[in-house]
Amino acid sequence: MSQIEGEKSAPLYETVERILRGAGHRLIAVPTVRDDAATITLRIREALDEGDHERALRLFIQLNDNLAAEAPEIRFALSIAEPEPTGLKHWDAAIAGLIEFRLAEVGLPSPRWVDDSAKFLSHRWTFGERGFADSPDEARVPEPFLKRRVLIDRDTLASA
């Protein structure tokens, strides 16, 4: 494993499969080139760690667009793996809200990780708030966000 991590060796498929099975996972192919929620969340965390909130916002919108562009079964596949925490609870709540929102609109259930109590806020947070954003009218906030106390206007989620 250390040789693989140190990029001194390229693992064979069988090696990767064995490592994943040992962790209780399987490697599957998903017919898309779009990144999943776990991958984009990792990038959001990196952006936040670097203080680049604008990049984090763009990545969140990219995740939204990735999910919106896919067929229902691919949306679910892109959402099934629980992302690592971003380090900021309000971002974790927003990501969980987005997953629930995009899956519910095509009649799919959310993965269990979306309903974890850590994905709900005790105080309201306006998405993208940097001291100058107005809170949207709560009637314009989709339910999966509203119940997590993440205020985001539905027009922000309108995919191009």
Image: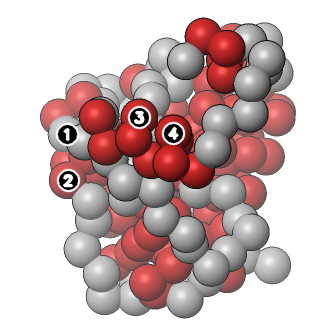
Count neighbours of disc 2 (C-alpha within 10 A) and say few if under 14, some if 14 to 19, many if 20 or more.
few
Which label was assigned to residue 15? 4
Image depth: mark 3 or mark 2 in front: 3
Q: Secondary structure at mark 4?
A: helix
Mark toward the viewer: 2 or 4: 4
In the picture of the structure, the residue carrying the numbered disc 1 is 116
**Earlier-in-chain disc, 1 versus 3:** 3
Residue at mark 1 to residue at mark 4: CA–CA distance: 32 Å
Q: Of 66 and 78, which appears nearest the observer?
A: 78
User: Tag 4: residue type?
Assistant: Thr
Q: Identity of the amino acid at label 1? A: Asp
Q: Amino acid at mark 3?
A: Ile
Instruction: For marks 2 and 4, give the CA distance.
Output: 29 Å
Q: What residue does disc 2 label?
A: 112
**What's the distance in space between the residues labelled 3 and 2, CA to CA?**
24 Å
Which of the labelled discs sits on residue 19, or is there none? 3
Q: Which residue is at 20% across, 53% downward?
A: 112
Q: Amino acid at mark 2?
A: Arg
Could you say whether the residue bearing mark 3 is in a helix, strand or loop? helix
Residue at 67% in and 14% down: 3
